Amino acid sequence: MTSYRPVTPAILAELETIVGRAGVITDRERLEAYSHDETPREQYGHMPEVVLAPASAEQVAAIIRLANRERIPVTPRGAGSGLSGGAIPVHGGMVLSSEKLNRVLEIDGANMTITVEPGVITNDINGLVAERGLFFAGYPMSVETCCVGGNIAENAGGGKAVKYGVTGRYILGLELVTPTGEIVMLGGKLVKNVSGYNLIQLIVGSEGTLGFVTKAIIKLSARPKGRIALLALFSDPQSAIDVVPRILGEGGVLPTGIEFMDRLSVETSCRYLNEHLPWENCGAMLLIEVDGSQPAQVEEDAFTIGRLCQAGRAQEVYVADNATTLERVWSVRRCIAEAFKVYSPAQSLEDIVVPIAAIPEYVRRLAAIADRHELLIPSYGHAGDGNLHSTLVKNPAWSDADWLAREPVILREIYGLVKDLGGTLSGEHGIGSKRKDYMSLFAAPAELELYRAIKRAFDPNNIMNPGKIVDV
Ligand SMILES: Cc1cc2nc3c(=O)[nH]c(=O)nc-3n(C[C@H](O)[C@H](O)[C@H](O)COP(=O)(O)OP(=O)(O)OC[C@H]3O[C@@H](n4cnc5c(N)ncnc54)[C@H](O)[C@@H]3O)c2cc1C
């Protein structure tokens, strides 16, 4: 176990010479906001000793060099919307925030790229490039709040991944400050690049453990001219999921996304939003979206998918084909997590992945686990890529101590089921500190040792986001 040194007044004074007084936060009340992400604060939160808000890669490099020299842990942070404790400074030390690194450096229409600093809000990119007929295909459900740096570090997925894939596909270049304080530029505006090891894709998804991203060159796509979403209601989860492989296989149409929501999820989100979708008589819903450059083709694709849903015993299929109705149906999906937080802040939002065909068995066996342990475990998520956000919601009759004792037991049972079905621990939210102790259930000792060797090669003193993914 690495031992770390505290942030002393002398170190604070040195930090002030790097970022100025305003860039060094030590006020306890302000530090508190950086002590947690979207995992339950009481369970996973940890206070930093100082938060730093640098405004350039050079400042980031100077801070990291100092931290490396003094053996002080550094935790990169974007918007703090993470769901795995990745941005939580579990060993104290410094939080390095990207809040002032939020400039758009270049929009290059000819190469269809945008170059941004890591603190840019993901959704803002689309506002900036829309008039050029372009868009960024990354679409985590937190798109309006999360930052590009956090998306890269988590390799964020979301509601459009079936067609467009996940964040990593769009990262052509990265500027990285390494854990020893060197600034390196990886890649560029290059669509193809096999010159050497693929360090860009190693950094993507490495959860801020291998360096701090200070710049990203992002590939843009042609903005679709048509978009239609279908909301299909089914009597039970099995019937809903049975349709997914038919859509992907027989339909000859690649939907943008296929989202699954069990009845409990839809009901809770609708109540939270005061929305009136007809969930009362259905057991599950699929939200399926298609898009494309030819509106007539998009309509035909939507028709084909609607037909497959009906052939798959959908009770009803509703069509959302304008901005207002599209936003209405998507907001029900986007707000599920928030809605359950209101029901109970004590919960565990999971991110398991199983082969798509195994989803019905997963949902069935998960319901049995929920019954046996007498708690709610709604399931919703990205059915088109087998990634479900089953959420353990504390039974209100349990004390907090009960919950803390029972949660790991139930989680191990669920992870056992996931492993049994050929699945894994996280599809898009990452391991962070929340899931670190469960990594050995899915990764063999030799694989974990490779992770440690990579970490040591980048970060010999283990100062960069320690306590995440795997212990070194
Ligand atoms: C309501 C809700 C819905 C969500 N839906 C989705 C979804 O559909 N798909 C999905 O993938 N995720 C989803 N998330 C999770 C979260 O929004 C994503 O993981 C997002 O990518 C995190 O971005 P952030 O800026 O908030 O990062 P943070 O939470 O601040 O940090 C996340 C990780 O990135 C690292 N990091 C941040 N900035 C940098 C940097 N500059 N350099 C190196 N490392 C850095 C941190 O150390 C940490 O490990 C959702 C979250 C919420 C609350």
Image (spheres, rainbow, N blue to C red):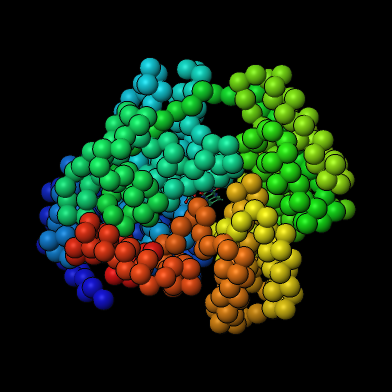
* Count of numbered marks: 0
Taking depth in this image into account, of 48 and 259 the one nearest to the observer is: 259
The reply, left or right, for residue 393 in relation to residue 164 is: right
Asked whether 172 or 129 is in front, the reply is: 172
The quadrant holding residue 298 is top right
Residue in view at x 60 percent, y 69 percent: 420
Asked if residue 63 can be seen in this view, the reply is: no
From the viewer's perspective, is residue 228 above or below residue 407? above
At x 80% / y 39%, what residue is drawn? 308
Q: Is residue 301 left or right of residue 16?
A: right
**Residue 458 seen in this snapshot:** yes
- State the quadrant of the N terminus: bottom left
Instruction: Quadrant for the C terminus, please.
Output: bottom left
Q: Where's residue 385, x and y in %?
A: 60, 49
Residue at 76% across, 35% down: 305
Tell me which corner region of the image, top left, top right, bottom left or bottom right, holds residue 403.
bottom right
- Residue 436 pos. (x, y %): 42, 68
| Relative horizontal placement of residue 340, taking residue 29 as reference (left or right) | right
Q: Residue at x 40, y 45 (%)?
A: 152
Provide residue 463's location: percent of width, then percent of height: 23, 62
* Direction from residue 464 to residue 324 in the image, left or right: right
Q: Position of residue 393 (x, y in %)?
A: 64, 68
